[in-house]
Structure formats: C-alpha cells, structure tokens
Image: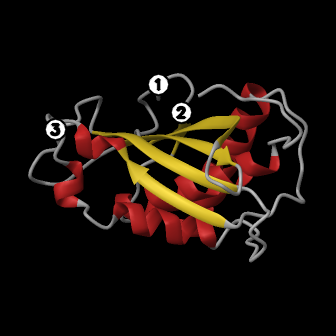
Amino acid sequence: MFAHLKTLALAAGVSTLALSTAVLGSEDVRISKIDVESSVASMADSNALTFYPDLEEDLRSEIAQRVPLSSDGADPQIRVDIRKIALNGSVMLPETREFNELEGVVDVTSPTGESSGLSFAVNISAYSGDAVAPEGYVNVPPSETDFYVAMVSTFADVVAEGLKNVNTSGNKVDP
C-alpha cells in the first residue's frame, strides 16, 4: 500500500511540477552535495523540530537515494530549506506529533555554494479524500502508513522529479 501511496503522490508531484515550471528538463544533472536546513527552527511558535530533530538528516538521506550523485566538485549542489511543518496550517504541533503539511524550497547552487538562481518550491500535504488540499500542494491521502515516513519520502520524490525539470543553463523557477 505504501508503494501505491508513493506512486500516487509522485504522479501528483510530476503533474504539479510540469504545470508550475517553465524550464526544459535535464536528466544529466548530477549533484555533488545535498544540504538540508530548516528555517522552521527559527520560528518561535513552531515545535516541529522538537518532535522531529532528525528531519533534516532523514530528508537529506531520502533525497540522496533519489538523485544522481557525483564526486566531482564542479557539479552543482542543492540546498533544501524546510520552511513549514504544520497541522492544518498551524505550525504549533499537538502533543500527538501529527502534521499534514510540509513546505520547502530547493535551491540549485554553484559548486562554491552560491545560489545559481535556480529554485523550486516543494509543498506536500496529507488530507483525507473529501478534504481539498491547498493550491500548489502534492497531496498524500492519509492511510495507516506512518505520516512522517510518507511525507519525507514524498518530499524527496518531488525534489528528485523537480531536479529533472531544472535547466542549468540559467532559467529560474520561483518558489
């Protein structure tokens, strides 16, 4: 069932990215470094990283499994900024640790870590079949699957798919 869930979410992610990006695909992009940071940590009214202190490393690991990696220091890097972890829009998660929205921005950087101007947003949500996800989100329908694993995995899937849509010749996708 988890594989089916990931397939549905990935298909939705591909459709969302295809509609929201105006750049040419490049499957030859190899990534030399993946940095994941969370600006959520700086939000005084958010407790998500208290509940999920390994989120950054878990996400980095999932992305590394999905994107072509390179040991060539001349290849681009990616920086992922997790900007929101929320339950129905509220960044203060309940003691049950539930969340159903995960937002971030992927920035393709030069080998020196400087922004190349190429970026794209990743918005993942988990809402039941009768609820409507916010515009621009890839929806993961709730199931018995661990939400954390499903959300992180789907986020990584959308990052990998988004990198295929990035044209490293200079086009920019606004977050």
Q: Amino acid at mark 1?
A: Pro
Q: At which x and y percent is residue 129?
A: 46, 37
Q: Give the farthest residue toward the left.
A: 95
Q: Earlier in the sequence, mark 3 or mark 2?
A: 3
Q: Which picture quadrant has residue 46?
A: top left
Residue indicated by mark 2: 137
Q: At which x and y percent is residue 119?
A: 66, 36
Callout 2–callout 1 Cβ contact below 8 Å: yes
Q: At which x and y percent is residue 131?
A: 41, 29
Above or below, comparing residue 114 to residue 150 in the picture: above
Q: Amino acid at mark 3?
A: Met
Q: Is residue 122 visible?
A: yes
Label 2 neighbourhood size at 10 Å, few (<14), some (14-19), many (20+)?
some
Residue indicated by mark 1: 134
Residue indicated by mark 3: 92
Whole-number angstrom distance, CA of label 2 to CA of label 1 = 6 Å
